[in-house]
Image (spheres, rainbow, N blue to C red):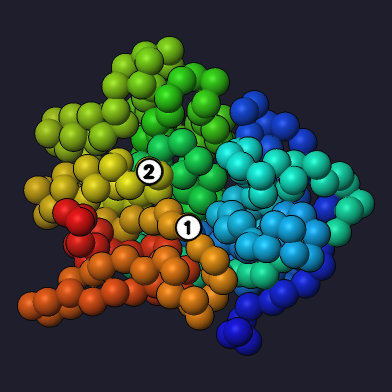
Amino acid sequence: MSSSVRQTKCRILQHECDGNFRRLVFEAPEIAALARPGQFVHLLCGGTHDPLLRRPLSIYRAEADQVAVLYEIRGRGTALLAEKKPGDLVDVIGPLGTGFTLPDSPTQQIVLVGGGIGAPPLSFLASTIAKSFGCERLTTMIGAQTAEKHICADEFRGLSVDDNACLLATDDGSCGHSGLVTDILRERLKSESLISPMIYACGPTPMLKAVALIAKEYHLKCQVSLEAKMACGVGACMGCVIKVHNGGGCKYVRVCHEGPVFDAEEVVWDE
């Protein structure tokens, strides 16, 4: 385990519902000091051996001595995690993975494209960008299945300079654009209201692939944060590998270690 990674039992400070999601805040000063947008923590959800595997959760906030995650109950592990209460201890390893690389220039236009549970790590990224460069050149585009499934929308609006800087989409048309969030990205690029922005994306794989293709079409730099099922979370088990381009060929890399953030052009999307 890297010297920049900590395993510790952390006291839960807050654990509450946030719409369809759960917001978990725990005390972890060393992890909070090291955490960067795009990284994740690996939580033990139940007892020592049940369930055996930890659950990877993207870091949503890392401030002072606290770390926060937002998650959705999707199975037995997250259901057990949802039963924990303030004051309980949770076993945490983190921060893990390679996060987003911030732009070099404060004049660079930046677009964040998120889908579903991919919004929280982008919220962490947005707040970091705002502290480093301000919000004037930041645009966020967030998609969800329904209005009720949108997460972090108020936070993105709070960092937006106007209504055109925070754009929402829903599959059912209940909020914002009716359709895919990538429709908004393509429309804004086509209208030239965005000039050579750097794109950061996090969400389901089909969305990330679509964003990567659009970025390639417009010759734009793009970083994507991938989802993968992880066992160890520290690069030892090789259970979360993906294929990436390597010169004239391909190779396999670990999402938990070399990722979860990759250059979009690096990823082999067709397999």
Q: Which image quadrant is residue 28 in?
A: bottom right
Residue depicted at 28% across the width and 42% down the height: 206
Residue 209, image x, y percentages: 24, 48
Residue 13 badge? none
Indicate the position of residue 171 as horizontal and vertical percent values: 36, 21
In percent of the image, x 50 and y 80: which residue is there? 236
Mark 2 or mark 1, earlier in chain: 2
Instruction: Give the left or right position of residue 177, taking residue 249 as reference.
Output: right
The structure residue drawn at horizontal position 40% and vertical position 44%, both measured from the top left corner, is 203
Q: Is residue 257 above or below residue 140?
A: below
Residue 134 image offset from top left, x and y in percent: 47, 50
Q: CA distance from mark 2 to mark 1?
A: 13 Å
Mark identifier at residue 204: 2
The kind of residue tagged 1 is Lys
Neighbour class for label 2 at 10 Å: few (<14), some, many (≥20)? some
The residue drawn where x is 23% and y is 76% is 251
Circle 1 sits on which residue? 229
